[in-house]
Image (cartoon, coloured by chain):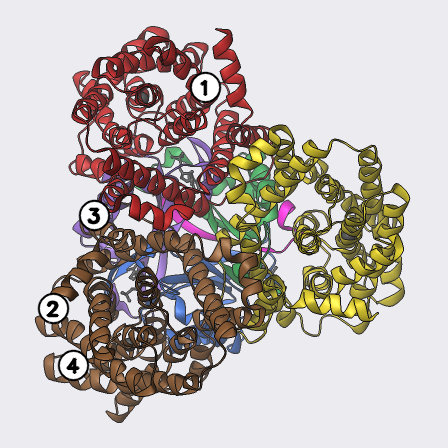
Chain colours: A purple, B blue, C green, D brown, E yellow, F red
Amino acid sequence: METHTAKRVEIVIEAPLERRLTKALTEAGVTGYTILPVRGGSGRSGQWSRAGQVGQSGMVAVVCLIKPERLDGLLEAAFAVVEKHIGVVSITDAQVLRAERF
Amino acid sequence: METHTAKRVEIVIEAPLERRLTKALTEAGVTGYTILPVRGGSGRSGQWSRAGQVGQSGMVAVVCLIKPERLDGLLEAAFAVVEKHIGVVSITDAQVLRAERF
Amino acid sequence: METHTAKRVEIVIEAPLERRLTKALTEAGVTGYTILPVRGGSGRSGQWSRAGQVGQSGMVAVVCLIKPERLDGLLEAAFAVVEKHIGVVSITDAQVLRAERF
Amino acid sequence: MNEILSLAGANLISPIILSFALGLAAALARSDLTIPEAVAKGMSIYLLFAIGFKGGVAVSAHGVDTTLILTIIAGLGLSFGLPLIAFALLKLMTGLSRIDAAAVAAHYGSISIVTFVAGTSVLEGRLIEAEGYMVAVAAAMEAPAILSALWLVARGGDGGKMEPGLIRELLLNGSIVLLVGAFFIGAVTGEKGLEEISSFIVAPFKGVLCLFLLDMGLIAGRGLRQSRGVLGLGAVSFAILMPLISATIGLTLGVLIGLSLGGTVLLMVLSASASYIAVPAAMRVALPEANPSIYLTLSLGVTFPFNLTLGIPLYLAIAQIVTGG
Amino acid sequence: MNEILSLAGANLISPIILSFALGLAAALARSDLTIPEAVAKGMSIYLLFAIGFKGGVAVSAHGVDTTLILTIIAGLGLSFGLPLIAFALLKLMTGLSRIDAAAVAAHYGSISIVTFVAGTSVLEGRLIEAEGYMVAVAAAMEAPAILSALWLVARGGDGGKMEPGLIRELLLNGSIVLLVGAFFIGAVTGEKGLEEISSFIVAPFKGVLCLFLLDMGLIAGRGLRQSRGVLGLGAVSFAILMPLISATIGLTLGVLIGLSLGGTVLLMVLSASASYIAVPAAMRVALPEANPSIYLTLSLGVTFPFNLTLGIPLYLAIAQIVTGG
Amino acid sequence: MNEILSLAGANLISPIILSFALGLAAALARSDLTIPEAVAKGMSIYLLFAIGFKGGVAVSAHGVDTTLILTIIAGLGLSFGLPLIAFALLKLMTGLSRIDAAAVAAHYGSISIVTFVAGTSVLEGRLIEAEGYMVAVAAAMEAPAILSALWLVARGGDGGKMEPGLIRELLLNGSIVLLVGAFFIGAVTGEKGLEEISSFIVAPFKGVLCLFLLDMGLIAGRGLRQSRGVLGLGAVSFAILMPLISATIGLTLGVLIGLSLGGTVLLMVLSASASYIAVPAAMRVALPEANPSIYLTLSLGVTFPFNLTLGIPLYLAIAQIVTGG
Ligand SMILES: Nc1ncnc2c1ncn2[C@@H]1O[C@H](COP(=O)(O)O)[C@@H](O)[C@H]1O
Ligand SMILES: Nc1ncnc2c1ncn2[C@@H]1O[C@H](COP(=O)(O)O)[C@@H](O)[C@H]1O
Ligand SMILES: Nc1ncnc2c1ncn2[C@@H]1O[C@H](COP(=O)(O)O)[C@@H](O)[C@H]1O
Ligand code: NA
Ligand code: NA
Ligand code: NA
């Protein structure tokens, strides 16, 4: 089947920042993303698990598929939010079906 | 360690279609997949979050690792289900351990 | 934005093994990982869904972003745990922001 | 008229309705208050189990009326028929496409079990008895409307393909199975069974309903906020007019069959209520081209609150006048 | 015999058993009815806390019998010993590999707390008192069976490596900690503590148990559907024969120790029941080569329903005859 | 002094405190006992709804005192002011950075609703009445402390940027909305409303609180285990000294305003308690540079258990002596 080149960006960020990140993405023109729950993790700020949390805490993973030419705009928007906070950003090359959607 | 080339296909699709998708995959000979819950997202049909849903709604993410030569069969099977529905399909190159499993 | 080459390793493994896997990763010097819940799946040992489980069962997906040169150490540590158990390991090429974190 | 308003007023300041209003207000004000999906699902399982069980116990106590079968047939008829009326009305009042109109119509032929439960609570509050088997009627009315909607689409030649396995799926839908199953358990174990578990399914029932309606309010509010502008005045008017028409038909059938005052009111409530669980899920599979935000907003954002606040007391008042009860 | 059957019959039409049957039927019919994992886990936490607490209160009220220590020792002995019998039987009756047989054996040495709770409910329904500390015996019987199974495998030289930290993990298993912890809280706070929270842990208990068993039925049904064909007649026969043997041994020990009728029945139930929570998780770690669908299907799909429906009334009837109670 | 100790002793063997201790012990022993996030959130929604509702009913029954407004103003003042004291103390007693100290200070100006609930339970247990509107005071005290902390940081020139929308978010925080909303529902529906749902929100309340505190114990224990070594003696001393100072200020204000004995104790408890839900989430947004494990460990790992076990009985005893009640 015909596929089209795209970038898959995965941003793991603290849950209280979720709204700010999606707002920043939307403002940068990224309207497609999927948010996955995260159960636990470990990083420079130590190990944590969802079970050891109270309230709206923990992290979420936001996955965006975008046209390669829009990557930089997305990364800048994301970085502005992630910068001072706990979180990681990774990018992989991908192919998508139905390019008109991205 | 020895690794083997594979494709990683990620299909985000509406939860009520989950059974149909996995059935189509199985019929296309794909027996390995992992289903991740999705917490929310945004696309052409707008923004949604798991908290704003009643009943068996929302989306799920289905991840398949397969031998490259089986990619087309998988995509066709998946596309037949996804086509008219809300959802996205992306493909990345991957390496796997234990090739005999795929 | 400046990005750095990395590897993204995804390990799908049975939940009762989660602690052993993260311990093995930590001992192999991998301190960054994210654990995603898994809702269901299918593989050589058949189909399952979270709803058909009692107790601490089912699978989890552990995602690690690491510097390419550390990949082998990670795979060996992971494989030692996954080997006899149910689970899959896949690796993709990735780019990351903020290389100093990995 | 005065009486109706005072009834409606009394209904409005119950904890149940106010909890719904709280949820609605919180969502419209964009509070981050949310009830976890699993908890909401747990509460709906509790409510379905309790309402089914109590219905079954009532039937086991009072025996099976000769009207039982008639009422179930009436329910099936309503569920098959109301979508046709709704569809005609939508074509008249709105500019919705054939497929969107059919999808909306399916929702109004089916039922909302929470509206039914709220109706039961209002009756209990006024000590009005109702036939226990109305729960079974509710279950019977869940699915047929979907078939009518698919037929409406198929007639137009736009597809609306009858997926293999869909009917089976509709009938084995979790909420139908739980409702009917609990009904049978209640019918078999009777008063003795109820006694064993009544401090679980009777005593805390209304309180759980409050929290559940809080969640429904949150969901309805979020839906309204996101779909602002999607709906025209025509569609919104439909969502208020249709339940009134349906309730009137339900009333007529209830009186013809000879249901008690309570039973008649519940048949009106079932007719007037619109589904927002079983039917939307079925529509995603069977009519994926239909726009979910249209049917969800009408059903959950307009008709559901209308029935909860004004509708139920109105139907009760009318039924009292008509039946002289 | 007649008496046993009528007892079994009476037991079968309780809401508890019927809820299990409903879940089983729904799963076999492939309904999409599901209880969210979090809710199911929440209910099991509730049940463990309640049963532990009530056991502790009972002990604080009646004091520690001299038989307490004997009974715990008996429980440990059963948990260590029954897997050996189960293993021998499996080698005789089935073609299971050494590792699969050992894994299954571990399940039958350990216990199912829900079966225990169902047994308690039946006793309460007949106003038969039992020693409060049977809860502590249940906790004691959870883990030792796993060690026996590992020993069986190690003896065969097939590995079954004793993972470091596994014993610690077994003993600090969530359900054991909660059961024992709640037992101590109950024992310390006594009747006064119970009074404070009895409208939470006593009144709604049976109702929660209904919904929990509904879920167990769903899970057992799905397990049976997926593992059709995995099990031979030999294995299925084992899953019914083994609880009968275990119950007989439990009966003997109970009578020897001098337990009350109720205590004896509960020791039989514990012996006869098979684990499906703690042991399967331990097996995934310690015996990953064993096939989970074999041990889960036998324990949850065959033995659990057998005990729930026929086993418990049978054990009660036999104990009544033997003890003359 | 003796009296205080015996009061504290009596308090310590309640099921509520012991449940917390069980959770703490299980986490420290690294048991895998966990309560699913959704269930914990469900329980906290239940507790907030129940406590708010009962507060509202109390106000509707006793009418609005003239002291109500004074008490709310006092609450706001405490929430704004206590962080300044906490900050000064932290700079004195610890080597924490300006930002970390400000973040910790915010927690001690805000409140812990569970500590408040535990205080209410202790009062109820001793049949001491308290003003129903203390719930509204609790809600008023949740957010202002955050503003003080941000001001402390801004004054130091280190940023602590006042994110647009943050204040709105703070005021529309889920727990505030639910608490205040339920308070209004209770106030509007009064005793009649309470009667309808009291077997849900009154009867099982203490039992739910037990399980909730079990979870808090698990979380606090895990936090302590992971942050071993992060905290110095100075910080830990602060986490015990600060509540004593806050309680004293709360006592003074309560007496000045003329609150009842119960009301005074609750104002002391609110002052002494430290937030671990609303404030940590706000800090992640507003002061991301602050180290979460410092403020969470102090608030949840030290101050929360201190208040629960020793603090509350101490405040009650002191208030009894001071007010002569
Ligand atoms: N190398 C990594 N690979 C995958 N996830 C990571 C990695 N580093 C950090 N994370 C995730 O990001 C969270 C915050 O990381 P940190 O800011 O380093 O504490 C962690 O809890 C993980 O969920
Ligand atoms: N570009 C994208 N990147 C990641 N996920 C997407 C993207 N577009 C859509 N999705 C996901 O697919 C769902 C449906 O998309 P759509 O059909 O465009 O409304 C969304 O709710 C997202 O969860
Ligand atoms: N090819 C695959 N692609 C994605 N996930 C897989 C694949 N094979 C197995 N899995 C996941 O790994 C689990 C165990 O696989 P298995 O050991 O083959 O039974 C499955 O339940 C899936 O969640
Ligand atoms: Na209807
Ligand atoms: Na056993
Ligand atoms: Na405070």
Label 1: which secondary element: helix
User: Is disc 4 in contact with disc 3, using a CB cutoff of under 8 Å?
Assistant: no
Asked whether the residues under marks 1 and 4 belong to the same chain, the reply is: no
Label 1: how many Cα within 10 Å (few below 14, some 14–19, many 20+): some
In front of the other: label 3 or label 1?
1
Quarter of the view holding residue F306: top left
Magenta residues (range): C80-97
Q: Is residue D23 left or right of residue E200?
A: left
D208 or B53, which is in the foreground?
Answer: D208
Q: CA distance from mark 4 to mark 3?
A: 31 Å
The residue type indicated by label 1 comes to Phe
Q: CA distance from mark 2 to mark 3?
A: 36 Å
Q: Is residue D313 left or right of residue D139?
A: left
In the image, residue F201 sits, relative to residue E19, either above or below, namely above
User: Is disc 1 in contact with disc 2, using a CB cutoff of under 8 Å?
Assistant: no
The answer to if C87 sits in the magenta stretch is yes
- The residue pinned by badge 3 equals D30
The residue type indicated by label 4 comes to Leu
- The residue pinned by badge 4 equals D90
- The residue pinned by badge 2 equals D1
- The residue pinned by badge 1 equals F306
Q: Chain of mark 1?
A: F
In the image, residue D296 sits, relative to residue F260, either above or below, namely below
The residue type indicated by label 3 comes to Arg
